[in-house]
Image (cartoon, grey):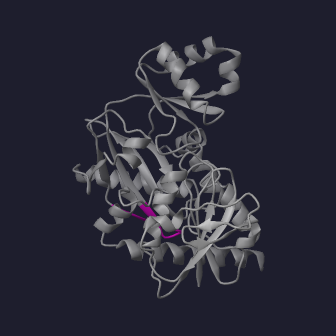
Amino acid sequence: MKITLLYGGRSEEHDVSILSAYSVLNAIYYNYYQVQLVFISKDGQWVKGPLLSEKPTSKEILKLTWSEDGETDKWGEFTGRVIMPCEIKEEDTIVFPVLHGPNGEDGTIQGFLDTLGLPYVGAGVLASANAMDKIMTKYLLQTAGIPQVPFVPVLRSDWKENPRKVFEQCEGSLIYPVFVKPANMGSSVGISKAENREELQNALEEAYRYDSRAIVEQGIEAREIEVAILGNEDVRTTLPGEIVKDVEFYDYNSKYIDNQITMKIPAEVPDEVHQKAREFAKKAYTILDGSGLSRCDFFLTSKNELFLNELNTMPGFTEFSMYPLLWENMGLKYSDLIEELIQLALNRFKQRQSFYER
């Protein structure tokens, strides 16, 4: 079987995707699969690279240049070509979309692959779209009774029309400090902390650089713990791991460029917190119609109160990433995790196809 590895993408998390893709390439069982590289550039070009039958020796294989006419493309030492997205459809192929953020993790690629009739790793359209949008996630989890920090959604149109009203809404429901986030973005991109009204204004303007919808959340003193989730209808979870912080929050560079993240796996928390985090993670995953994989992130206060922060349907697969390390702690090796994700994707595809055949 051939695995088409989709990576890159148009979002701000383009570079994270490349790092994740390289890690996945090194974890696949090449005695069962060949891997077709398909890169999506920041401007939306789809470029078909080499077909791999063994582990790459360098990240350079993922880097490419191509001419404007698309005829003399070069992929490192390999030749490639610009293609139409629909050209990825082939027999006996499964797609692994290692894409983070908008235009990759938000249901757009998933809907496209469904239309082509291709099996793919990860969540479907509904879960991807809802989990990517922080505002929708909050509302859905509210209905399930899953605790979250107080929040105020703020549309850019409302902000432009009446900033004073937005300030009143935020300051009437929350107290400083607050955190401001784009509704559709991950990896700490566009997130700012605000201690006063002036900083809140600047934070909203920063968030609107990435999305037309933003969310303002109550800042709290808390630890950050994360649970990995795996499965379709039979959902499994890991013991939580902890992001050990020496600053108030990590930005994009801290997470992926400078590698300043320290992780404690498993987290040193009471057994009841372990159990509650896993229960909430499974419940959130089910409510959002998760499949394949997700990572569920929580805030944990000094009183052992848990607040669900977000659910990430395509968590990072870099060598620094929490998701594969959490499963490794549970006894599931990286390569076996990739294989299980592939099998989950095939099983879900077969089930969906059976619905059409009735």
Does the rendering let one see residue 231? Answer: no
Q: Is residue 190 left or right of residue 263?
A: right
> Tag count in the figure?
0
| Residue at image coords 53%, 68% | 232
In the rendered image, the vertical position of residue 283 relative to residue 29, given as above or below: above
Residue located 58% across and 44% down the image: 140
Q: Is residue 235 magenta?
A: yes
* Res 9 → quadrant: bottom right
Residue 287 versus residue 46: which sits nearer the camera? 46
- Where residue 270 sits: x, y (%)? 22, 49
* 25 over 63 or under it: above or below: below
- Can see residue 306? yes
Quadrant in the picture for the C terminus: bottom right
Along the viewing direction, whichever of 73 and 286 lies nearer the viewer: 73
* Rendered position, 189 above or below 72: above
> Image point 55% across, 60% down: which residue?
290
Q: Which residues are magenta?
A: 229-238
**Drawn side of residue 107 relative to residue 30, left or right:** right
Of 74 and 156, nearer the camera is 74
Quadrant housing the N terminus = bottom right
Q: Residue 79: image x %, image y %?
A: 63, 72
Q: Does residue 153 show up magenta in the picture? A: no
Residue at the top extreme of this rendering = 164
